[in-house]
Amino acid sequence: MRDCEIINENLRCALAGFSWVDAAGETARVAGLSLSFSGVPYGLFNTAVVSDAARCGDMGELLNGAAGFFARKRSPWSIWFCEDFFADRQQRRQASVSLAAMGLKSVMAAPGMIAHRMSPPRNELPSLECVRVGQVKTAFDFSHTMAAAFVVPLDMSDRVYASERLWTGPVRGYVGYAGGEPVATTAIVIGGGAIGLYAVATHPRHQRKGYGESLMRTVLEDVIRETSIDTVVLQSSRSGFSLYQRMGFRQVTQFSVFLAERP
């Protein structure tokens, strides 16, 4: 697989993990799409991922398939796709027309990054107690750290990340504690022959101290040892891009996310 396809497949696995949030959760496949319904009414957690590059030129058909699935769920939803799946500019223009015609709103453009080998840290990193999310306390610590870092409503974060069901699925969450206080989070998903990093967050009170990098490296060291997989992928935020470059990641593609705010 191309690097962009590895990242896309890992993302597909990660977003499918949100189907574990609620008992009503569900995953499905339709032509060219991987669909995941979380059971909670937030569009970014009810997702359609373009899984077949050959179908990316039929964006109108893909959108109709996703809209039909989520209409039956009466849920807002989002579509995620890799820009390198388009064969040419004409396909991109046609996709833009289809997205606009259906009234979807652009909400995110995230660099897709990959590291086949991690670079060593440049500086000494702070030590953390790394705890895998499982019990109620760690789930709420994960949720509250995420909500503070990304400035999202706490009730929304709790519905997803404080759900004990989520952490019984393919998504593994970790909280880093400094002096007993939760300061950083990360999650990993294994898929597409790679380890995917997600939900990387540091509480605003503790940013720029190296906690996020320390937690990521600790978790990755353990998971690489466990799985013998040494390819790591992620979708970067703007603020995290330079850190990931220092860690050995390089950008190979970009992912676009569009939101359908109504079912």
Image (cartoon, helix red, strand yellow):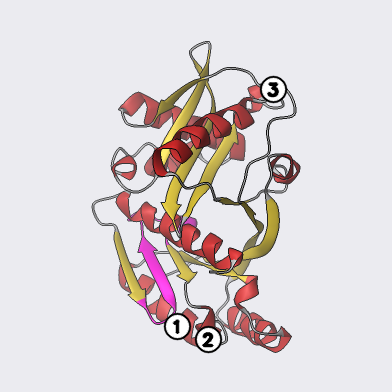
Q: Is residue 212 visible?
A: yes
Contact (Cβ within 8 Å) of mark 1 with mark 2: yes
Residue at 62% x, 46% y: name it: 117
Residue at image mark 1: 64
Q: Residues within 10 Å of mark 2 (few under 14, many from 20)?
A: some
**CA separation, marks 1 and 2?**
6 Å
Quadrant of res 161 = top left
Residue 46 to residue 151: above or below:
below
The amino acid marked with disc number 3 is Lys
Label at residue 60: 2
Q: Position of residue 136 (x, y in %)?
A: 32, 28
The one of 155 and 252 positioned closer to us in this rendering: 252
The amino acid marked with disc number 1 is Asn
Q: Magenta stretch?
A: 30-46
Label at residue 41: none
Residue 140 to residue 8: above or below:
above
Of helix, strand and loop, which one carries label 2?
A: helix
Q: Residues within 10 Å of mark 3 (few under 14, many from 20)?
A: few
Of helix, strand and loop, which one carries label 3?
A: loop
Residue at 70% x, 89% y: name it: 90
Of discs 3 and 1, which sits in the foreground?
Answer: 3
Which residue extends farthest left? 23
**CA separation, marks 3 and 1?**
46 Å
Quadrant of res 162 = top left
Q: Position of residue 85 (x, y in %)?
A: 60, 76
Quadrant of res 41 = bottom left
Query: Which numbered disc, 2 or 3, marks the residue that appears first in the sequence?
Result: 2
Contact (Cβ within 8 Å) of mark 2 with mark 3: no
Residue at image mark 3: 209
Residue at 62% x, 25% y: name it: 211
The one of 243 and 183 positioned closer to us in this rendering: 243
